[in-house]
Amino acid sequence: MLRLRLPSLLILSLLPACTLLQRKPSPTAPPKPAYHIDTALAAALKPAAASIEIDLTRQEMRLLNADKAAVVVTQISSGRNTSPTPTGDFKVLEKLPTKFSNRYGKFVKPDTREVVVWRTWEHHGPPPQGTRYEGYEMPHWLRLTWPGVGIHQGEFRPGELSSKGCIRTPAEPQQVIWEHAQVGTPVHIRGSSAAHPDAP
């Protein structure tokens, strides 16, 4: 009789341990920006034939070929309502694989890189003692204005305005756009982002 009950007791004794090993449901991840790359058109596109169109109302950017066919379509995040992205016709003034901002950055401890002040532009007075300025990284940089507006890779939540005037894009489409753009590539920015909320 004891032998018959032993397996059952053993299984029951293991149940609490198994339930402890079950993972708790993780909170819902924020949505990622949507984009599409036409690889065939991208392979055939020559930089001299490329142009870029940005629609602030739709929060969307397109890389176009000479026939105005969309090579890349991607969601973007433009300037906040307090620092909107300018509209009009521009040309790429500068192309860098990575740029570090000299206006927007953080104060860090040089030895440990521990962040002491996350937003230097909101800091008043001299830098905290024992820190240095570190500009935020802006990969695949395409400058549109000399005061500092450009297109670059950056994180954002779709539908929210998150920059100080620049156009932020997801990594993969921005790399394709950057590879096909050159100094002089025309960039047309139209629409209004006023209906979109600023990111927290």
Image (cartoon, helix red, strand yellow):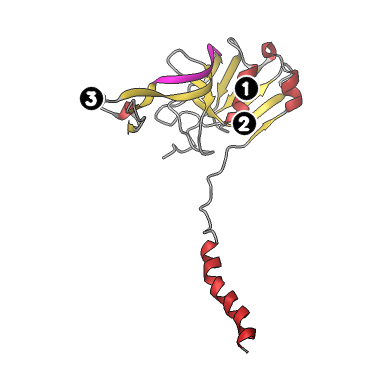
Secondary structure, mark 3, is loop
Give the CA separation, mark 1 to mark 2. Answer: 10 Å
Q: Where does the C terminus fall, quadrant-wise?
A: top left
Disc 1 vs disc 2: Cβ atoms closer than 8 Å?
yes
- Callout 3 crowding tier (Cα within 10 Å): few <14, some 14–19, many ≥20: few
Q: Which residues are magenta?
A: 92-102
Is disc 2 placed on a helix, strand or loop? strand
Q: Is residue 61 magenta?
A: no
| C-beta proximity under 8 Å, tags 3 and 2 | no
Where residue 74 is drawn, which disc sits there?
2
Q: Nearer the viewer, mark 3 or mark 2?
A: 3
Q: Which residue is mark 1?
A: 177
The residues bearing labels 3 and 1 have C-alpha atoms spaced at a distance of: 39 Å
Horizontally, is 17 left or right of 105 in the view?
A: right
Whichever of callouts 3 and 1 sits on the residue coming sooner in the sequence is 3
Question: Image quarter for residue 125?
Answer: top left
Amino acid residing under circle 2: Thr
- Quadrant in which the N terminus appears: bottom right
Q: Which residue position holds label 3?
A: 125
Residue at (41% x, 27% y) in the render:
83
Residue 97 in magenta stretch: yes
Prevalent SS, magenta region = strand
Residue located at (61% from left, 12% from top): 182
Which residue is depicted at the point 56% across and 66% down? Answer: 18
Q: Earlier in the sequence, mark 1 or mark 2?
A: 2
Identify the amino acid type marked 1: Ile
Q: Callout 2 environment at 10 Å: few (<14), some (14 to 19), or many (20+)?
A: many
